Image (tube, grey):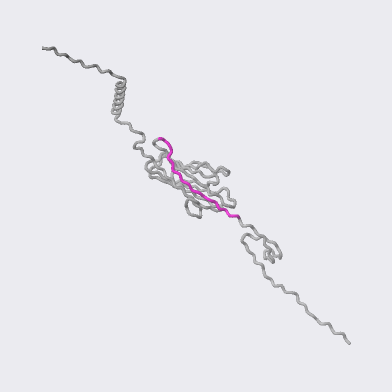
């Protein structure tokens, strides 16, 4: 009977690559165990995040004209800017409406159906006004309102002024990276100011207002005066024959 030989297993040499692989597997197991312990698997920050959508529409209107993208005003006439704003999809966080009124215009009134109108000033000199601001805060989705701004041209000397473009914005804060999401719209106004009619000098003969003839009077623009028509009667003369000499 021949003795049996036992074959001993050959020892495997562990390389550095094997050690790196084992380390990676161990790290992955640790991460998985931690996630299972917390009960939550980490997800990208933007996944399933809904962004709000602000909306803004702006129009201009003269007191005697239609409402649209351009209003034409005359001397002494104001322009009304209407900013219709809204929010959709989800809540607009930190929302506000701003209107950068050009320096050519002087603001006389600012009102809003929603939010708070921040203090503003309208300087009489160059530079215009600080951008008008209406603070809305956290504005609900589906909500809306209107900001009304009334202004007039500072310079109303005869001629054409503008068009002057007025830009407004509605902004809200993104819940992902805290950047601003903005909606913008513009409207314009043009001023057309005619020259005042010049006064004219008129000579009136036999004016009933002066009681004198041949008087120069300053007639108001557009006024008329009639010149009286008088018939002059020339003096009459009679011829009387001289008496014949007596004989």
x, y percent for residue 3: 13, 12
In the image: residue 133, left or right of residue 223: left
* Quadrant containing the N terminus in the rendered view: top left
**Secondary structure predominantly adopted by residues drawn in magenta:** strand
In the image: residue 52, left or right of residue 227: left
Which residue is pictured at 57% across the width and 43% down the height?
Answer: 126
x, y percent for residue 10: 23, 16
Which residue is pictured at 41% across the width and 43% down the height?
Answer: 54
Is residue 184 inside the magenta stretch? yes
In the image: residue 139, left or right of residue 233: left
Q: Identify the image quadrant of residue 138.
A: top left
Q: In this view, does 237 lie above or below 201?
A: below
x, y percent for residue 17: 31, 22
**Highlighted range, magenta:** 177-195
x, y percent for residue 202: 67, 62
* Quadrant containing the C terminus in the rendered view: bottom right
């Amino acid at each position: 009977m021949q003795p049996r030989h036992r074959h001993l297993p050959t020892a495997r040499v562990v390389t550095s690559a094997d050690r790196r692989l084992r380390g990676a597997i161990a790290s992955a197991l640790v991460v998985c165990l931690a996630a299972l312990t917390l009960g939550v698997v980490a997800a990208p920050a933007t996944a399933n995040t809904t962004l709000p959508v602000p909306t803004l529409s702006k129009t201009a209107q003269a007191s005697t004209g239609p409402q649209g993208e351009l209003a034409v005003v005359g001397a002494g006439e104001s322009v009304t800017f209407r900013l219709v704003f809204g929010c959709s999809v989800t809540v607009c966080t930190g929302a506000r409406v701003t209107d950068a009124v050009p320096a050519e215009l002087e603001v006389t009134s600012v009102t809003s159906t929603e939010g708070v109108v921040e203090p503003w000033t309208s300087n009489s000199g160059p530079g215009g006004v600080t951008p008008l601001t209406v603070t809305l805060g956290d504005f609900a989705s589906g909500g809306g309102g209107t900001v009304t701004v009334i202004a007039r041209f500072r310079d109303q000397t005869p001629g054409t002024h503008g068009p002057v473009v007025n830009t407004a914005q509605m902004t809200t804060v993104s819940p992902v990276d805290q950047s601003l999401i903005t909606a913008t719209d513009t409207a314009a106004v043009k001023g057309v100011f005619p020259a005042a009619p010049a006064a004219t000098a008129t000579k009136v003969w036999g004016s009933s207002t002066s009681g004198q003839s041949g008087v120069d009077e300053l007639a108001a623009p557009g006024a008329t005066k009639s010149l009286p028509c008088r018939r002059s009667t020339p003096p009459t003369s009679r011829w009387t024959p001289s008496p014949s000499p007596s004989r």
